[in-house]
Each structure stands twice: as C-alpha cells, then as structure tokens.
C-alpha cells in the first residue's frame, strides 16, 4: 500500500524519519513530500536514504534535471491518484489553515485537494498556537470533512513552554494510519465472499437492463477484508474499478451468472456479503437480433431473476450472511422485512436519495440491521470506513 507523508516546517520534523521506519515495518510504501520550511529542519536526503526514492520538495522543477517540465507540473495528480492515504506529520498551524481554506500554493497543499484518499494529520506546535481559536476552528473544519486528527501530546515543548503541542509518538500516529487503512489481521484464516456492482440482463445484442450501481461499496468491502488478512473472493458485475490486490476476481454479467459464481464458492466462505445490485427482473425473451424502432409503443415482458440472497438464507449453514438494501423510503421498515424474508444475519440499508449516500459516491450513510433487533446507524463516512464497520460487526455475530 502506498502512503504520501507530508512533512512541514516544525522542530518535530526530524521525528518523521522514525515514523517512516515504523510504517515500512508494515510493508507500506512511503513517498515523502516536504514543504520548503521543513527543509530548514531536516534535509531531504535523510528521507531519500530511508525510503530509497526521490523526496518531492517543489511544485515545479521536480524532475531529475531540476527544470520545470510537464511531468513535474502534473506530478501532484499522479501522486494523488496512486496513494492509499495522505499523512501529514508534523502538521503546523500554517498547513492546517491552508488545508481548511483550500489554499494550494505548494505541492503538499495541491496534493491535499487532488487526492480522494483518506487523510491523517498529526499537528505539532506551540501550546498557545494549538489552543488559539483559529487553529481549533481549522481543526473542526477538517474533522467535519472526515480528516483523522491525531492530537498532540502534552509536555515540555521546544519553545520552553509546557502544555499540549508536542507531536504524538510515532507509534500512536502509525496505529491511527493502520486503523484508517484497515491494517488489522483479525480476518486471517477466514474466507469472505463479496458480490459487487450491477448485473446486465440482455434485451437484444445491443441493449440490456441494468441499474446505477458503480460497485464502489462492494469493492471497498473486498479491499478492507484483504487488508485485514482474509482470503477474498470478489464476484463482480461490470465496473470500471480497480480490482483489490490479492482478491480472487470472478467477473460476471447477468444475475444467473452471479448466482452460479456465488453457488460455486459459497461453501468455501465463512462470510458472504452480498453488496451487488442484482437485477430483480430480466426480459422474458432475449432477442437474437436488434429490435427495430416501430411506430407505436413497445411492451416488454419481464420475469424474476434468481433471489441469490434468499437461497443462501434458506440453507442451514454456519456462515454469516450479509445483505444490502438500497431504499428510497421507509428504510427501517423495508430493511427489517428484508432481514426476515431473506434469512440474513445482517442487512446494510441506506437511503439512496440522501446526499453522500447514493450511487457512485465515495461516501455512504448506512444503518446496520441485526437479527437481535439492534439498529446501528452510522454517520456519513468513506465507503472504506463503512466496509470496516460492516466487517467489525460480522466478527461479533455468533451463529447457533
């Protein structure tokens, strides 16, 4: 997994070298980005020697020749797209203000705006700067955006004062990074079968019925499970998403194909998580030739597709079964009914009309409905965070 580590201009900048080593112990690939002020405290060569790669220090002129070129000018976009997490440690009051207000006057500020990866920030500064209302307001803004803040420790500071502001210990910061990335090995030895994406039901050789599912939620579940040590079988309808590394990818198109793939692998799984948006109906007849436009209305006859979740729910098995419910109204009522009807252990329901919870978003707002009668409502969070909460809950389910 790839991490960008932003190092900003504070006395604690030298501690970032220890942090890099700790992250590398977990096989994380670290790309260091330094602000100009950070270079007043630590030389880029220090981080280059530890990571074995170039340290990014300038927005332009970052190429090997030192001259501005197209490659260096768009490097922030390349880094933004390939990282799994952006970490800034130490983070000064200045960089917190820039992040909060969208100021992108250097590589790190631009990287923050360009990436969709989760972010962890570990501030370090004078106690008065830390307690200032402007700093606290900027922190509140970043927290509201989903940035994970590792609060500084209290103690004797480099400025001679005592109080909050000392950079948190490297191990504390590293543990937050591991938590956000889902780097827990609590699923080692388990096999998790995940379905994702839409299905396509052919009408003729050029047309099909489908839905608006992007597959992002299911792929996030697969990614989280892989990171936590599980063997993951990902049965996926058509998507444009990157396949999680180490996942066993089984591509399908139709509901019938998805049923076949799930049935083939279900016996191997300890947990089945049905995040796919499987079509409920398909054309009763798939025409061999393209249907031509006529002068009047066209009536299509539809027939139900296999109910994969219900089939699994009817089986006597020790595996845990999780279903999804994308709803537009009466969320709790519909989810509870589906939980009982399908024989699932948990239903993950969301209102797709809510902003930040619909199709093709990077966030979700869900409620977990459990057989024991509990409803666990989660706030808006990234789909990877939602995936980890779902996996956390599956570990607590005890089958008779």
Image (cartoon, rainbow, N blue to C red):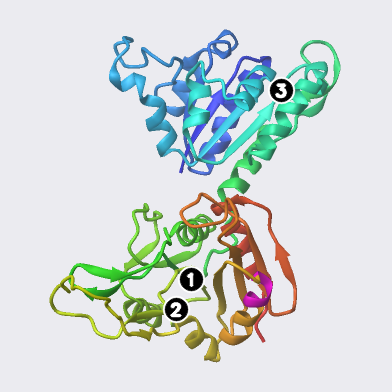
Instruction: Give the distance between the C-alpha atoms of the residues marked 1 and 2, in whole angstroms.
Output: 7 Å
| Residue at (51% x, 30% y) in the render | 113
User: Foreground residue, 222 or 227?
Assistant: 222
- Callout in the foreground (3, 1): 3
Residue numbers of the magenta segment: 331-335
Is residue 252 visible in the rendered image? The answer is no
- Which residue is under mark 1? 191
Percent coordinates x, y for residue 313 in the rendering: 54, 86
- Which residue is under mark 2? 268
Percent coordinates x, y for residue 4 in the rendering: 49, 32
Label 1 residue SS: strand
Q: Earlier in the sequence, mark 2 or mark 3?
A: 3
- Which residue is under mark 3? 124
Number of numbered labels in the structure image: 3
Q: Earlier in the sequence, mark 1 or mark 2?
A: 1
- Quadrant for residue 73, please give it: top left
Label 2 residue SS: helix
Q: Is residue 367 above or below residue 284?
A: above
| Residue at (68% x, 53% y) in the render | 379
Q: Is residue 391 above or below residue 262?
A: above
Instruction: Give the distance between the C-alpha atoms of the residues marked 3 and 1, in whole angstroms.
Output: 42 Å
Label 3 residue SS: loop
Q: Which mark is residue 29?
A: none
- Magenta span: chief secondary structure: helix
Dot 3 surroundings within 10 Å: few (below 14), some, or many (20 or more)? many
User: Foreground residue, 144 or 270?
Assistant: 144
Q: Which image quarter is the C terminus in?
A: bottom right
Dot 2 surroundings within 10 Å: few (below 14), some, or many (20 or more)? some
Residue 362 shown left or right of residue 389 in the figure: left
């Amino acid at each position: 997994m790839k991490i960008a580590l932003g190092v900003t201009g504070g006395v604690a900048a030298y501690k970032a070298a220890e942090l890099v080593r700790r992250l590398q112990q977990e096989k994380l690939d670290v790309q260091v980005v330094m602000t100009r002020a950070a270079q007043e405290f630590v030389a880029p060569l220090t981080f280059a020697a530890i990571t074995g790669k170039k340290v990014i220090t300038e927005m332009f002129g970052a190429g090997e020749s030192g001259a501005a070129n197209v490659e260096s000018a768009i490097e922030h976009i390349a880094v933004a797209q390939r990282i799994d997490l952006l970490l800034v440690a130490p983070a000064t009051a200045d960089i917190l203000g820039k992040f909060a207000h969208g100021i992108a006057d250097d590589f790190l500020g631009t990287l923050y705006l360009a990436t969709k990866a989760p972010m962890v920030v570990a501030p370090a500064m004078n106690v008065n700067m830390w307690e200032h209302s402007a700093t606290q307001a900027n922190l509140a803004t970043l927290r509201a955006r989903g940035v994970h803040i590792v609060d500084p420790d209290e103690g004797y500071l480099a400025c001679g004062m005592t109080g909050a502001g000392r950079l948190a210990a490297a191990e504390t910061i590293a543990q937050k990074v591991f938590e956000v990335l889902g780097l827990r090995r609590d699923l080692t030895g388990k096999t998790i079968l995940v379905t994702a994406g839409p299905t396509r039901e052919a009408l003729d050789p050029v047309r099909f019925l489908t839905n608006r599912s992007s597959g992002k939620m299911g792929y996030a579940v697969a990614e989280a499970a892989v990171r936590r040590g599980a063997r993951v079988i990902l049965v996926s309808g058509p998507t444009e998403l990157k396949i999680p590394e180490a996942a066993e990818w089984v591509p399908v198109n139709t509901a019938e194909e998805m049923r076949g793939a799930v049935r083939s692998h279900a016996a191997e799984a300890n947990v089945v998580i049905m995040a796919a948006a499987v079509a409920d109906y398909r054309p009763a007849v798939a025409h061999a030739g393209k249907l031509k436009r006529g002068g009047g209305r066209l009536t299509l006859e539809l027939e139900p597709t296999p109910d994969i979740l219900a089939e699994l729910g009817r089986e006597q098995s020790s595996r845990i079964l999780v279903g999804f419910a994308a709803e537009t109204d009466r969320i709790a009522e519909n989810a509870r009914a589906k939980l009982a009807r399908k024989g699932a252990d948990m239903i993950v329901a969301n209102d797709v009309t809510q902003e930040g919870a619909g199709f093709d978003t990077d966030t979700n707002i869900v409620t977990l409905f459990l057989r024991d009668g509990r409803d666990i409502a989660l706030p808006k969070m990234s789909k990877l965070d939602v995936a980890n909460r779902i996996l956390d809950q599956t570990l607590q389910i005890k089958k008779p």
